[in-house]
Structures are given as structure tokens and as C-alpha cells.
Amino acid sequence: MAHSVTMALKTKTVVTALVGTALIAAVVLYTAQDQTGYTNNQVSEMISSEVSSRMEDGHPQDDEDVLKITKWWQASSLLKWDWEKPPEYMCSEIEKRGNWHVCNDTTFEVKPPCLVYSFGISNDWSFDDAMGAIGCEVHSFDPSIGKKSFNRSKNVHFHDLGLSGNDSDTYVPTKDIYVKKTTTWKIRRLKTIMDMLGHTNRHIDVLKIDIETSEWPAVKDMAASGMFSKVRQFSVEWHLFPTYPSRSEYVGIYVDVMAMKKQGLRTFRYSFHQRDFREKTFRLQADVNYVNTLYKSI
């Protein structure tokens, strides 16, 4: 009897390992269909090599080890899959507000007295103005547009401030299409900003972030500090550019997104802007909308 139980447990472990390996294989092969830099044969060889090395080293050991992500292409493949798989929350009323979307069903309806934070404006105020028009208190942030803090309207308030995972008055942003010259910005954590604006005891009905890769340290900090518990809806443009963030950071980025999701964030919509899977020019850019299914009123 004891021998049978032992064999059954070993069989379960091996089957779990194969399922886990199959999941990674399916994700990577699915990505390969989108013209990655690797051919299907190369991807198959990578997967075979990964499986062989695990078996030679005495793996698998447990369920967690089965899905351990160690390579940048594994992390990016799983991120892509997580964004574009079928919605985790079926929102019955998805409404476009300016250039973004919100879930406006009974559970997550956005209505006054609503609070909206919008990070990343450039020259497009359509979302901020639309949320202000329905009576929400909107706070807009963008240190890249060269404007001092001002009130755009009765409900829309602009702040010359950026979002990140730490507080600094001397942050030097990466040069890109929005930043042409070396400059310094003031950046703050979400918690710092909410305290600064007197919103410590409020929740954010919609948190929108489009900040050209600065979302990664910001999300890491929000997940670690539990700030997502104050957010009902989260709209973000995720960026993985060819040269930054570093591919050595991808595994950590994947871990941070999963930590965020453990706090209740569930997708209800996505839209890709850029997808380039060639190794040298790899790029992912996607708008993803979440609701917080674990949100509890303060």
C-alpha cells in the first residue's frame, strides 16, 4: 500500500512537471507564430534543452519549480500571454472615455464623487477632460511637457510631477521621443502623492498610467506597499522597448506583475500598439485594463 502511494505521488509530480513544461512550450510556440526572432525549430530546441537539463539535474522537485522563470524570453512570453488571453473579468459595460476605456458595470461604475489619477499626458487631455466632465476629481501628472502646475478646469488639476518607485527631485529620464535633452524631473511614489494631495483615506476609482517604462518601478513599489488595495480600476500602457528596460530585469518585472495580480487586479480589456519579436529589436507595447476584484470600500 505504502509503495503504491509513493508511486502515485511520484507520477503526480512528473505529470505536473510535464504540464508545466507544456505550458511554457505552448506560450513560447504561440509567440513564435507572431514572427519571433527564433524559428519554430530553434524554440523547440530551447524547450528540449530546458526539459533535458531539468531531468538530468534531478528535476522536477515540486510544483513551484516546474514553472520557475529564468530567461527573458520566458518572462516576456508569459507577460504577453497574460495580457492577451481571454478577459479574467467579463465587464458588461466597457465605455471609452477619451483615448482610454473604463469598466462601467454595476460593480465598478465610475460616478461622483470619483477620484481619478492620470499619469502621462503629452498633448492628449481627452481622457482627463472626459472624466472631469462626468464630475470626477481628476489629477493629471506629466513632468515632460514643460508646464507648471495649474488647474485646467474646475475638476481637472495638473501637477508638474512624475510617478516612479521612489521620491526624488533630481531624476534623470531616459532620452526618447518625449525627452530630447538631458533634464531632471521631480518624481514621487503613489503613496507620497496621495498623502501630499490629502487623499490618504480615499480610494482611486481609476488609476491611469502611460509613462514610457517608468510604470515598472512604480508597479513594483505599489505592489510591495499594498497600494493597489486603494485602486478600483487600473489602466496602463505596458512598455518593453528594445534597449530598456534591460532584459535582465524581465524576470523581476514578471514577478512584480504577478504580485500586483495577487492583490486582485484582473484584466477586462487589452490592445496592442507594438509587437516585434525579433531578438535584436524586441518590443511589446500594450494598453491593458484591470479591475480590482478584491477591492473593499474604505
Image (cartoon, helix red, strand yellow):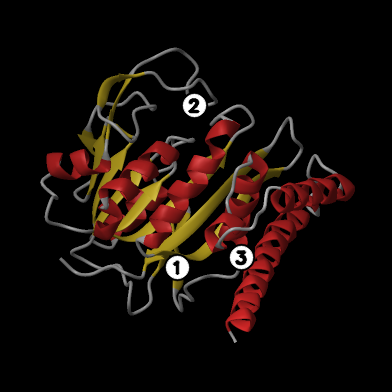
**Taking 79 as reference, is 294 left or right?**
left
Q: Secondary structure at mark 1?
A: strand
User: Around disc 2, counting alpha carbons within 10 Å, would you say few (fewer than 14), some (14 to 19), or many (20 or more)?
Assistant: few
Image quadrant where one finds the C terminus: bottom left
User: Around disc 3, counting alpha carbons within 10 Å, would you say few (fewer than 14), some (14 to 19), or many (20 or more)?
Assistant: few
Q: Which residue, given by chain and number where applicable, does mark 1 sit on? A: 95
**Residue 85: mark:** 3
Circles 1, 2 touching at the beta carbon (< 8 Å): no
Q: Secondary structure at mark 2?
A: loop
Amino acid type, residue under disc 2 in the picture: Tyr
Corner quadrant of residue 278: top right
Amino acid type, residue under disc 1 in the picture: Glu
Q: Which residue, given by chain and number where applicable, does mark 2 sit on? A: 178
**Residue 157: mark:** none
Mark 1–mark 2 Cα distance, whole angstroms, equals 28 Å
- State whether residue 19 is above or below residue 160: below
Image quadrant where one finds the N terminus: bottom right
**Taking 122 as reference, is 57 left or right?**
right
